């Protein structure tokens, strides 16, 4: 169900999702009931101009008598919510789910199944977003909730490109900051680091929702470069790596030892980045423009990338 502080009517789509508009800012209790499932009540805070998303995961009841519990919850809330704005949505005929929304200025946390819905948002602050080989990347992670008792985190990243060097526990309390330090161990550093919440609790020792976040890191390329081909010497083909500091057209030319051009490879427009790995670098099959295998010996390859030109040598065996 979505609750909007902007726009007082609730509607349900064919998936059972409700959207409620025209709510005035305040603190609300949202009750979700489905026959045969444990009722859920969540506290939400609606702010002007903000949209609050509330997700309910209903647990199936094992004891039939517990089904009547939701009537007790509904009654208790109504008794405390006299003279308050009350909005009830009729039962969804397809899903037989009952959604009720109450504006509250009182604390009813002692009711069964109450969950304080104050989602934790993680804030990532990196010292840089473009990284070079062997450089360090520092990321400060904090939360927006002073009432956070603790949140356990998991870090998902490409371990072939980055090395997490510090051993600080992946745990945050309140608005304190967790610092992660990575070292670049690859030439190609285009990657994403994801921070995934495992569990979070507030100061009342209640489990609360937390949102993960991610940051995209790119390879820092101060200048366009042509790198050494590999393998060298080559006999079945070779890869010619390069880096681009800006988007441009790229082409490669290969010359024999007496300066005759034997092969031209047009790559067309390429975006800024590193072209080092086999799936990105230029591949030359050691054939000339007539598709004949070139003879053994010393060769030169020249790259043209916009105004940039560079040449290197290699051996065909």
Image: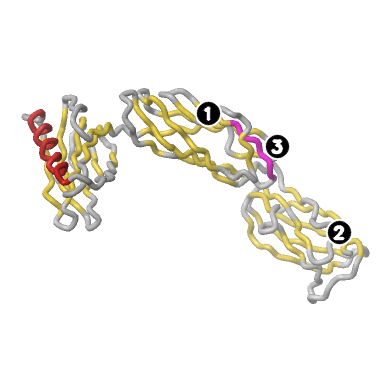
Instruction: Check whether the beta carbons of the residues at disc 3 and disc 2 lie within 8 A of each other.
Output: no
Q: Is residue 46 visible?
A: no
Of residue 131 and residue 302, the one placed in the foreground of this image is: 131
Residue 66 painted magenta: no
- Measured Cα–Cα span from mark 3 to mark 2: 27 Å
Residue 134 disc label: 3
Of residue 23 and residue 212, the one placed in the foreground of this image is: 212
Work out whether mark 1 precedes mark 3 in sequence or the reverse, and give the earlier one.
Answer: 3
Magenta residues, start to end: 181-186
Label 3, secondary structure: give it: loop
- Does 179 appear above or below 275? above
Residue 39, image x, y percentages: 20, 41
Work out whether mark 1 precedes mark 2 in sequence or the reverse, and give the earlier one.
Answer: 1
**Residue that mark 1 sits on:** 169
**Which residue appears at 68% of the width and 53% of the height?**
275
Name the image quarter holding residue 139: top right
Residue 233 disc label: 2
Determine crowd level at label 2: few under 14, some 14-19, many 20+ residues with C-alpha closer than 10 A.
some
């Amino acid at each position: 169900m979505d609750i909007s502080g902007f726009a007082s009517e609730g509607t349900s789509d064919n998936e059972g999702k409700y959207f409620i508009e025209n709510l005035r800012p305040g603190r609300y209790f949202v009750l979700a009931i489905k026959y045969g499932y444990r009722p859920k009540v969540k506290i939400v805070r609606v702010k002007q101009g903000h949209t609050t998303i509330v997700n309910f995961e209903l647990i199936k009841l094992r004891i039939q008598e517990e089904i009547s519990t939701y009537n007790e919850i509904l009654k208790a809330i109504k008794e405390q919510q006299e003279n308050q704005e009350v909005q009830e949505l009729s039962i969804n005929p397809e899903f037989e789910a009952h959604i009720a929304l109450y504006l509250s200025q009182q604390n009813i946390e002692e009711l069964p199944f109450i969950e304080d819905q104050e989602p934790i948002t993680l804030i990532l602050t990196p010292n840089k977003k473009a990284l070079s080989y062997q450089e360090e990347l520092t990321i400060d992670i904090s939360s927006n909730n002073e009432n956070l008792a603790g949140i356990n985190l998991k870090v998902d990243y490409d371990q072939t490109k980055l090395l997490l060097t510090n051993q600080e526990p992946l745990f945050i309390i309140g608005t304190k900051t967790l610092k992660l330090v990575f070292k670049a161990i690859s030439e190609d550093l285009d990657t994403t680091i994801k921070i995934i919440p495992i569990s979070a609790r507030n100061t009342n020792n209640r489990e609360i929702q937390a949102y993960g976040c991610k940051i995209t890191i790119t390879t820092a390329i101060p200048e366009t470069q042509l790198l050494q081909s590999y393998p060298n010497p080559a006999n079945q083909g070779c890869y010619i790596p390069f880096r681009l500091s800006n988007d441009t057209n790229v082409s490669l030319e290969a010359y024999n030892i007496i300066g005759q051009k034997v092969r031209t490879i047009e790559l067309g427009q390429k975006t800024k980045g590193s072209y080092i790995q086999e799936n990105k670098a230029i591949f030359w099959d050691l054939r000339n423009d007539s598709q004949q295998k070139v003879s053994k010996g010393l060769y030169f390859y020249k790259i043209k990338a916009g105004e940039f030109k560079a040449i290197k040598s290699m051996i065909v065996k």
